[in-house]
Image (tube, grey):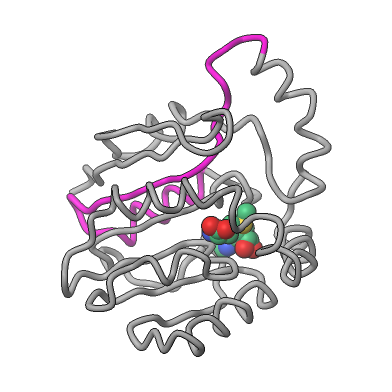
Amino acid sequence: MLTEDSVVKIYDRWGRFYDIVFKWIFSEGRNAGVELLNLKAGESLLEVGVGTGLSLPLYRKDARIAGIDVSSKMLEKAQDKVDKLRLKNVSLKVMDAQAMEFPDNSFDCVTACYVVSAAPDPHKVVSEICRVCKPGGRIVFINHFKSQNRVLARFESLINGVCRNFGWQTTLDLESLIAANDLTISVQERVNIFDYWRAVLCYNSSK
Ligand SMILES: C[S@@+](CC[C@H](N)C(=O)[O-])C[C@H]1O[C@@H](n2cnc3c(N)ncnc32)[C@H](O)[C@@H]1O
């Protein structure tokens, strides 16, 4: 099982190698997420689980970007990118996405790139995202969600235990996350190798 402590330990360990392994293989999804967000000048965006900040250079410079992550080692790498690229519009903070410090309705849009299934309680993360996103705001998830194919879904539950040791689960059900929150799906695209991941644009329908 993923716990708060194990997630921090696993991603603190990934910190040094994360970009070498995951920069390119997940880049299609990150690019798709930025396109779906369609940020406008002056808008505020929260990137949940910003990790080493691989998406940060992709955002427009006249939007205000906040990035949070539970792993300080991942965030150190993100801060290096912010400093090197002089991204003055970006602020980073260690914070648990399951219990965020931001007030309600703080952001115009929120994105979570390969994060929801890396958290111990994905439902808490999504409900917190809906809370801090303004009503009608855009929310983008890039993630692998449980396959709709029964044979693949069975395989995914078999390998779930192994994958959790590396920091993610394979059986997250998109439909149950949407149903449990005031979210309306607007666009869904398949991304990355074998089209195995999904980029999903939702609107926050909560009042
Ligand atoms: C697979 S990495 C994705 C990093 C980055 N978004 C990317 O596109 O490569 C998952 C990230 O989510 C972070 N994470 C997991 N659970 C979290 C939580 N509860 N709150 C904040 N960040 C979390 C991890 O520390 C890690 O940096």
Relative to 176, say whether 106 is above or below.
below
- For residue 143, side relative to residue 120 (left or right): left
The quarter of the rendering in which ligand 1 is drawn is bottom right
Between 164 and 181, the one nearer to me in the picture: 164
Residue 149 in the image: above or below residue 161: above
- Could you tell whether 29 is left or right of 160 in the image? left
Front residue of 79 and 116: 79
Residue 113 can be seen, yes or no: yes
Residue 175 inside the magenta-drawn segment: no
- Please report the residue visible at 51 percent of the width from the left and 29 percent of the height from the top: 195
Q: Give percent across and percent down for residue 45.
A: 31, 66
The foreground one among 91 and 95 is: 91
Near-viewer residue (148 or 6): 148
Q: Which quadrant of the rendered structure holds the N terminus?
A: top right
Counting from the top left corner in percent of width and height, residue 48 is at 47, 62
First to last magenta residue range: 123-151
Residue occupying image coordinates x 48% and y 83%? 82
Q: Which residue is rendered at x = 75% and y = 32% of the image?
A: 160
Where 95 sits versus 142, above or below? below
Q: Quadrant of residue 94?
A: bottom right
Q: How many marks?
A: 0
Q: Is residue 20 left or right of residue 98?
A: right
Residue reaching furthest to the top: 150
View extreme (front): residue: 24
Residue 150 lies within the magenta run: yes
Residue beneath the point at 33% across and 83% down: 89
Q: Pinpoint residue 186: horizontal percent, then vertical percent.
A: 24, 34
Residue 133 lies left or right of residue 151; in this view the side is: left
Where residue 128 sits in the image (x, y, percent)? Answer: 42, 55
